[in-house]
Amino acid sequence: MPNHSAGKLIFPAEESFVARARRFHAEGRPPAPARRAATVPLLRPDPSGGDGFEVYLIRRAARMTFGGMYAFPGGSVDPADSSADLDWAGPGPRQWGDRLGLPPAEAQALVCAAAREVFEEAGVLLAGPHPDEVLGDVSGDDWERCRQALVDGRTSFADLLRDCRLTLRSDLLLPWSRWVTPEFEARRFDTYFFVALLPEGQLTRDVSGEADQTRWLSPADAVARADAGELTMLPPTRATLREIADCVDLAGLPAAAARRDPTRPLMPRLESTPDGGAHFLVD
């Protein structure tokens, strides 16, 4: 269970992480560069009709990086998206750049990555035929062929939107936080977290070959299960769920996101404990 100590977050660390960290420091290797990425907690109203809401979680397949961990849909940025000509609704690349602390082109690629990964891994498309519209159901065969072409690299996200005459709805994404993989990991990511509501009429689908399980849970329930050891999560996922759970309802999310600083990089680091073990510490 994470603890708060003098403004710091403390998370338990599995033995495998401790062993990798100690080996990394013993060998004196330089850290691998952190590749920029985006991830998106998708939210929906409580389907039972209550006042709460749920978040979509996927469990990474064992063969994947961080396999066995529950996470949100996400993946690496495609640099080609930085210069793509897109129909765009909501804050423009320059406004996104101001919010994320990035040049406009890099901010555009990051927003595209967030929307692309949600479509690739959850079958949800944050786009519409017009700037003030969002697509409904996109689970049909034609849309699945589009999604598969994207996954296979036979088309880019920009080309998909252009061919389908769609406008990217960047206004459906709320910037939340930024987390960097610890230096001892062989594969590292500089990941920007966005929050998005599931568009009305769309359904998440277990279409990603990178996941072996998906589920909708209330953020508080997901945190409780992680604390109990029922769900395995990395510190960024657990921290984000706890932060989202503090929102009383979905209507309060925009204001909560506006108070956050998505430019500040957070990186869990391992700290030894008196008993010879270690825990993750986030300042």
Image (cartoon, rainbow, N blue to C red):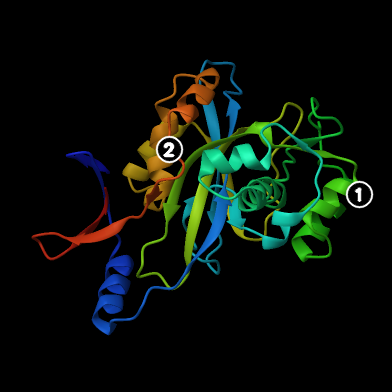
The one nearer the camera, 45 or 149, is 149
Q: Quadrant of residue 238?
A: top left
What residue is rendered at 53% in x and 24% in y? 254
Residue carrying label 1: 163
Using residue 99 as the reference point, say whether residue 246 is left or right of it. Answer: left
Query: Which of the marked residues, 2 or 1, is nearer the chain's N terminus?
Result: 1
What residue is rendered at 32% in x and 55% in y? 268
What type is the residue that disc 1 sits on?
Asp
Local secondary structure at mark 2:
loop
Q: Is residue 9 visible?
A: yes
Using residue 127 as the reference point, say whether residue 98 is left or right of it. Answer: left
The one nearer the camera, 45 or 22, is 22
- For the residues labelled 2 and 1, the Cα–Cα distance comes to 35 Å
Percent position of residue 130, x then y: 85, 30
Above-or-below relation of 162 to 83: above
The one nearer the camera, 208 or 96, is 96
Residue carrying label 2: 261
Above-or-below relation of 65 to 71: below
What type is the residue that disc 2 sits on?
Asp
Density class for disc 2 (Cα within 10 Å; few <14, some 14-19, many ≥20) is: some
Percent position of residue 230, x then y: 39, 47
What residue is rendered at 40% in x and 53% in y? 234
Number of numbered discs visible in the structure rendering: 2
